[in-house]
Amino acid sequence: MGYKVAVVGATGNVGREMLQTMVERGFPADEVVALASHRSVGREVSYGDDKVLKVQDLATFDFKGTDIVLSSPGASVSAEFSPKAAAAGAVVVDNTSHFRMDPDVPLVVPEVNPQAIAGYTKKGIIANPNCSTIQMLVALKPLHDLATIKRVVVSTYQSVSGGGKDAMDELFNQTRGVYMNEPAEKFRKKFTKQIAFNVIPHIDKFMDDGMTKEEWKMVVETKKILDPNIEVCANCVRVPVFIGHSEMVNIECVKPISAETARKVLREAPGVSVVDHRKDEGYVTPAECAGEDAVFVSRIRKDASVENGLNFWCVSDNLRKGAALNAVQIAEVLVSDYLRK
C-alpha cells in the first residue's frame, strides 16, 4: 500500500521538478494530486513519461486522507494552507521561507540532520531550507564532523531560476534584446537592475544592518541545521545563469585539516561528488550540474591566511537538490522511519 501525495504549486518550476523527482526515485505513491491557484485549474502537468495530472484548486481541496504534502507556492500561500493540510492529518514538507525559523518546525537537510525529522509531530510541518544553504551544508557536514568548523565565509553566485519562471524569462528576454538593440529596461520586471551580461549583489530584501534577507537566511539556517556556534558571513549575488547555484566557501576550523584529507572525506560523503583536478576543466560549473542530484565540490585548497583554513568551490542544481530533491528525500525518510504502511 502506497501513499497519497499532494504537490502544492505543481505548475511552478519547483513543483514540476518535485513531480519528476518522485517518478525518478520511485517514490511509493498510489495517488498524486497536483494543486495550484484557481488560475491554473484544469492545466495539465506531467508525472513521468506516460501520466498527466490535471491541476486542482488549492483553495477548495480537501486534504483529508492525504498522507504527505510537498509544498512550494509563495510563503504567504503556504502560511495559510500548510497548517490546514497538517490539521487534516497530512505531513507537510514546505519549501517556502515561512516556517524555517519556527522553533517547532524542523529544518532539514537529510544528509546533515535527518534525526530532526522526528520533530514533525509538533506542527505536522517540516521545512525545506534555502537552496543556497542546502548545497553548502551538504559539503560542510563531513568537514565539520572531522575538524569542527568555527567560521564560514561564503560568496554565492546564484542563478535566476531561484527567482522563478518570471526571472528566467527576464534573463532570456534581456539577453535577446541586447542583440536586437532593445533597452534592457523594456524587459525589467523581476530584478532591481539589468541581469543580462551583469551581476547583481542583491537577493531578497535589504535588512536594517545592510544584509539582504538571502544572506541572513544562510546565517540563521546554518546555525539551526548544523551548529549554533558556527559564525557565518554570507554574500549573495545573482548572476546571468539559468539553472545552478555556485558558491566559493572559506572555512576556519578548530582542528587542523589538510586539503588531501578534506578531499578524501568529501569523496565518501553522501550527496557529494568531488571533481577536483588542478588543470584546465578540472572543476564543475553550473552549466554542467543542471539536471544532476549531487553537490559538486572542486578547487579544494588550503587557506594559508588563517589557522586551519580551507577553501572550496561547490555547485548544485538549485531546482533539484536546492528544492525538489531535498523535499522528496525528506518524504522518503518520513515513509521509511515514521509513516510506515
Image: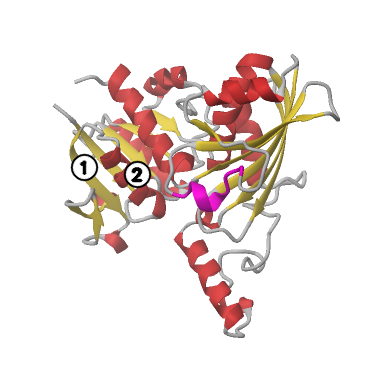
Q: Which amino acid does label 2 sit on?
A: Met
> Looking at the image, is 266 positioned above or below residue 178?
above
Q: Can residue 338 be seen in this view?
A: no
| Residue at point 57%, 79% (across, down) | 177
- Circle 2 crowding by C-alpha within 10 Å: few under 14, some 14–19, many from 20: many
Residue 201 in picture, x, y percent from top left: 71, 55
Work out whether residue 253 or residue 90 is closer to the camera in this orientation and state it: 253
Q: Which of marks 1 and 2 is nearer the N terminus?
A: 2
Residue sitting at 65 percent across and 45 percent down? 156
Q: Is 123 drawn above or below residue 50 in the view shown?
A: above
Kindly identify which numbered label has been placed on residue 291: none
Magenta range is 282-290
Which residue position holds label 2?
18
Circle 1 SS class = strand
Q: Name the residue under label 1.
A: 32
**Is the residue 305 above or below the residue 202 in the image?**
above
The amino acid sitting under disc 1 is Val
Give the percent coordinates (x, y) of residue 62.
21, 42
